[in-house]
Image (cartoon, helix red, strand yellow):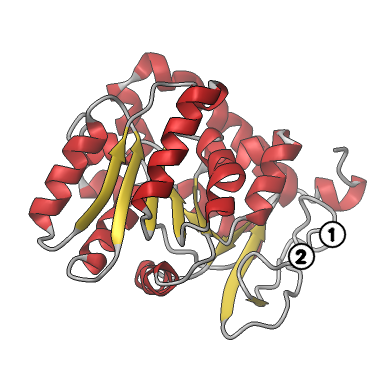
Amino acid sequence: MGLRAKCVSEVGPGLADTDSQKGGLELVEGHASDSFLGVVPIGPIKISLLSAEQLTQRLIGHAFGDVTQHVVTANAQFYVLAEERQDYWECIQRADYVCADGVSIVVACKWLGRAKATRIPGVDLVMDLCKSTAGLALRVFFLGGNPGSAERSAAILTERFPGLKVAGISCPPRGFQSDPDMLNDVLSELKKSQPAILFVALGAPFQEFFIQDHIRPMNIPVAIGIGGSLDIIAGEFKRAPRYIQRLGLEWAFRLAQEPRRLARRYIVGNTLFLFYLLRYLLGYEGQTGRAD
């Protein structure tokens, strides 16, 4: 198998044939739909090549529907999780849109797929969607984040974007998914509020599993895993200056603020990401196949 992954149009997001071998560099044709979505495979995941504006416009359209569109904002951590966990890989495969949150994913698209992916950080996607929905008959729900982050984020965003309608805010304690009573309370609140767009800030892999297992059956039109975006919007953590973002060092800026919590994720995780990326670049998988 060659290292150049041909970027073709996947017809219908999330409809690709998942029977192909996991981790290949070939893009599988999808099925008939009313529009085309360019994607490029990088190892175990396929990244959307939509621009931030195009993705926002699509999601606003979906928000008026009644079928859940699952959006994954992928970075190096997501890639490593998909490499190492079959259940997470399957979850990502079922998502409708996977955008490049981290610069590492953008670089992987260039190296493996010879394709230019737009970096769409979760925090920017939240901002773009809230700006676009202000004044529309669409309501948003903020779920997760550190205590108080969702409330502060909602207040900041409604002030910045007059007309933004907040369907609800919930910040359950960590591990609430394992407690049937707490989980039922959260799901009941979501069902009652009927948001058009749900921002899920539970971190990977929990937010992706939560959307697939609990939100899809509820048919909330748009559900997006946004990691620590609410904490940043709320001002709990500073976002890297633009020049650091352009250099691809936003992760280092984030690490400096939470070294104890993020050291393993970024240092070990980024090392593993580079290992997997180099393995593909050297043709290891094409020569030996992958042991699942």
Direction from residue 283 to residue 249 in the image, left or right: left
Quarter-of-image position of residue 189: top left
Q: In x, y percent, where is residue 124? A: 30, 54
In the image, residue 57 above or below residue 33: above
Residue 80's place in the image compared with 117, above or below, is above
Tell me what residue is drawn at x 47 percent, y 57 percent. 220
Disc 1/disc 2 C-alpha distance (Å) = 9 Å
Q: Nearer the viewer, residue 126 or 63?
A: 63
Q: Are marks 1 and 2 in contact (CB under 8 Å)?
A: yes
Tell me the tag on residue 20.
Answer: 1
**In this orientation, does residue 235 appear?**
yes
Estimate how packed mark 2 is, as few (under 14), some (14 to 19) or many (20 or more) residues with alpha carbons within 10 Å.
many
Residue closest to the eye, 174 or 7 = 174
Residue at the extreme bottom of the image, as rendered: 34
Query: On the image, numbered disc 2 is attached to which residue?
Result: 26
What residue is drawn where x is 36% and y is 55%? 195
Give the x, y percent position of residue 265.
Answer: 50, 26
Q: Quadrant of residue 252?
A: top left
- At mark 2, the secondary structure is loop
Q: Earlier in the sequence, mark 1 or mark 2?
A: 1
Asked if residue 266 can be seen in this view, the reply is no
Q: Using a 10 Å C-alpha cutoff, classify the residue at mark 1 as few (fewer than 14 neighbours), some (14 to 19) or many (20 or more).
A: few
- Amino acid residing under circle 2: Glu
Q: What amino acid type is highlighted by mark number 1?
A: Ser
Which residue: 85% across, 59% down?
Answer: 19
Mark 1 lies on a secondary structure that is loop
Question: Could you tell me residue 214's position as x and y percent?
Answer: 56, 43
In this rendering, position of residue 185 left or right of residue 27: left
Q: Quadrant of the N terminus?
A: bottom right
